[in-house]
Amino acid sequence: MQRGTQLGQQAKFEEALDVFRQAAMADPYDPNPHYQAAVTMMHLERAAEAVEAYDTTERLAPGWFNSRAERWVAAEIAAGRLEHPV
């Protein structure tokens, strides 16, 4: 998780996403890698994928950070009702 966060802070979003996905496979019950992956997907303008990651976060830990609000924004972007970036 630390490595993924470092990569994200360096705007290396594809690399960060790979690290977060690996972390999610290592511990599928931890909501944090899914949440961080969703945030990273939003930076990559992949809103539809982010919605799925936010859904997993919500399933694992209802109300994790701002996941519900961020999921709503991602869904609105994916549906074309909002423009990226918001």
Image (cartoon, grey):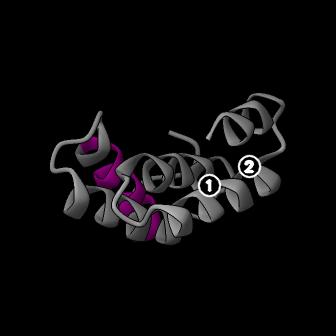
Q: Amino acid at mark 2?
A: Ala
Would you say residue 53 is visible in this rendering? Answer: yes
Disc 2 is placed on an element classified as helix
Q: Give the vertical position of 55 relative to 32 (above or below).
A: below
Q: Please state if 62 lies on the left or on the right of 79 as rendered.
A: left
Tell me where residue 1 sits by quadrant.
Answer: top right
* Residue 76: percent from left, percent from top: 36, 59
Question: In terms of depth relative to the viewer, which is nearer, 13 or 81?
Answer: 13
Looking at the image, which residue is at 32% across and 66% down? 56
Question: In terms of depth relative to the viewer, which is nearer, 34 or 50?
Answer: 34
Question: In terms of depth relative to the viewer, which is nearer, 61 or 43?
Answer: 61
Q: Where is mark 2, residue-wise?
A: 16
* Residue 17: percent from left, percent from top: 69, 57
Looking at the image, which residue is at 62% across and 55% down? 20
* Residue 63: percent from left, percent from top: 17, 43
Q: Amino acid at mark 1?
A: Phe
Tell me where residue 29 sits by quadrant.
Answer: bottom left
